[in-house]
Image (cartoon, grey):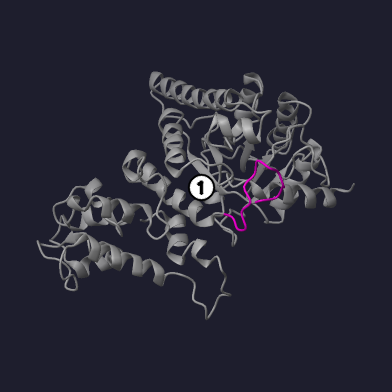
């Protein structure tokens, strides 16, 4: 099989992994080619929302496991291929020199054993870093069950590592991926987290001792991520958000990615979904931003009575309506984290408000200029003690009906899009914008 045929097979097999968006790294150029810095990564996005600046491929799709949800499961009759380490290295350099890519995302099915697969990944990255002196951004997978020694070797060469949890609970793993275990996934994840932390501490200690400028961390400098499949198993959004919250707090993950389940196999244990739950994926991403940047807790967004997000309102609006007594917020006196609780005020807008009001008191016209989305915020704020002109009265049902109407207005227009029986399940235009920018 020639290399072009392998590339076609293994690039196609990699498209289901969502955890490859690049955010740059602190790796410096050591008289070679490429640059892993933030400015060296092109933040280009395809129509499906995935980053397209990286060469995204599998080392191999010849998997020893038979995970029921995976296109590359061992029992599937699909075309199989395996790159050599040299082939991946040559492809990466060739694509980089043509200005097609700025870095590499390399994953793999598990060939023979986790350690055998990790050794192949290490050999590939070693050729790129040490032989071709490629300093660009590299993201690789950590294979569940691999040894700490191999993780350590690979982690010193790459910018980011990720190990996919895939399913939100041990019961789901037993049901759909019985050859994998929770400990096989969490043990290397914790090892990477501890190694990142130790690397930072050692570099800081060394810099302090010799009165030097702190160096950039050398072990996985861009941190680690993971991916969760949404909709393949019956876990609620609350369960998923609690898991993500623990991963952020205890393992210090950079990002949890949510991937709407796509039906590629037939199995009695798999759900029969006509369309992927894309709106649910969007809602989880929106809630994820609230956890990471807005100071929310999972238990604030959802509870046992309401374990799933509303299809008609984004998580922040839904929280605001459930906690209507928290409002209205006075723009000219509220603290930063109070401002972040207002629908329509994002991180950037809140910072601008905090800065601008030092000079003078703000009114609604000022807020528009600062980028506040008044279509949502107007119902929850006052300026100098006054409501927005069009707000007749502060009432929960009045606000709720107006916000839902606004959300419906963001649905695709039938004049420009083909209508479908399932349009109400798709993310709205507003959802997509909020998901990508994080401004809720």
Q: Residue furthest right?
A: 1
Residue 351 point in image, percent of width and height: 27, 52
Q: With respect to residue 268, does 437 lie above or below? A: below
> Residue, x 75% and y 50% (percent of image)?
94
View extreme (left): residue: 385
User: Outermost residue toward the front?
Assistant: 268
Depth check: give the residue in front, 433 or 27: 433
Left or right: residue 298 compared with residue 275:
left
Relative to 291, 282 lies left or right: right
Q: Is residue 93 visible?
A: no
The residue tagged 1 is: 38
Q: Which residues are magenta?
A: 263-276
Q: Position of residue 41 (x, y in %)?
A: 56, 50
Whether residue 270 appears in magenta in the rendering, the answer is: yes
Q: How many marks?
A: 1
Dominant secondary structure (helix, strand or loop) of the stretch shown in magenta: loop
Q: Residues within 10 Å of mark 1 (few under 14, many from 20)?
A: some
| Residue located at (72% from left, 42% from top) | 58
Q: Nearer the viewer, residue 99 or 295?
A: 295
**Magenta residue check for 77:** no
- 131 in relation to 274, above or below: above
Secondary structure beneath label 1: helix
The C terminus: image quadrant? bottom left
Front in this rendered view, residue 197 or 226: 226
Residue 35 seen anywhere in this rendered image of the structure: yes
Q: Position of residue 157 (x, y in %)?
A: 63, 31
Q: Indicate the position of residue 409 as horizontal and vertical percent values.
A: 40, 72
Q: Quadrant of residue 232?
A: top right
For this view, does 349 lie left or right of residue 19?
Answer: left
Tell me the quarter of the picture where residue 74 sits: top right
| Residue 384: quadrant of the picture | bottom left
């Amino acid at each position: 099989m020639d290399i072009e045929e392998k590339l076609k097979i293994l690039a196609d097999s990699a498209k289901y992994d969502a955890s490859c968006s690049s955010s740059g790294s602190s790796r410096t150029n050591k008289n070679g080619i490429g640059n892993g810095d933030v400015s060296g990564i092109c933040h280009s996005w395809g129509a499906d929302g995935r980053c397209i600046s990286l060469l995204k491929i599998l080392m191999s799709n010849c998997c020893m496991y038979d995970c029921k949800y995976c296109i590359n499961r061992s029992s599937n009759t699909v075309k199989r291929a395996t790159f050599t380490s040299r082939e991946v290295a040559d492809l990466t350099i060739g694509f980089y020199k043509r200005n097609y890519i700025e870095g590499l995302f390399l994953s793999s099915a598990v060939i023979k054993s986790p350690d055998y697969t990790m050794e192949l990944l290490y050999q590939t990255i070693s050729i790129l870093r040490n032989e071709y002196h490629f300093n660009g951004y590299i993201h690789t997978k950590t294979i569940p069950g691999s040894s700490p020694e191999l993780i350590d070797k690979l982690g010193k060469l790459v910018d980011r590592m990720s190990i996919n949890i895939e399913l939100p609970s041990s019961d789901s793993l037993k049901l759909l991926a019985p050859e994998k275990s929770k400990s096989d996934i969490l043990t290397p994840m914790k090892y990477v987290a501890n190694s990142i932390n130790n690397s930072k501490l050692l570099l800081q200690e060394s810099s302090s001792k010799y009165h030097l400028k702190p160096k950039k961390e050398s072990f996985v400098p861009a941190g680690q991520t993971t991916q969760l499949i949404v909709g393949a198993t019956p876990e609620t959004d609350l369960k998923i958000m609690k898991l993500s919250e623990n991963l952020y707090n205890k393992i210090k993950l950079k990002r949890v990615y949510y991937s709407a389940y796509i039906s590629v196999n037939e199995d009695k244990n798999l759900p029969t979904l006509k369309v992927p739950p894309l709106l649910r994926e969007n809602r989880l991403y929106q809630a994820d931003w609230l956890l990471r940047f807005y100071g929310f807790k999972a238990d604030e967004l959802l509870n046992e009575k309401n374990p799933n997000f509303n299809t008609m309102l984004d998580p922040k609006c839904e929280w605001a309506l459930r906690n209507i007594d928290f409002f209205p917020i006075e723009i000219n006196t509220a603290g930063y984290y109070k401002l972040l609780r207002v629908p329509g005020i994002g991180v950037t807008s809140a910072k601008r408000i905090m800065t601008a009001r030092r000079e003078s008191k703000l009114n609604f016209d000022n807020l528009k200029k600062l980028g506040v989305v008044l279509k949502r915020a107007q119902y929850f704020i006052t300026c100098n003690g006054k409501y927005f002109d069009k707000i007749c009265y502060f009432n929960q049902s009045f606000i709720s009906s107006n916000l839902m109407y606004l959300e419906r207005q963001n649905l695709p227009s039938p004049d420009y899009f083909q209508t479908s029986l399932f349009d109400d399940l798709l993310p709205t235009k507003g959802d997509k914008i909020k998901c990508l920018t994080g401004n809720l």
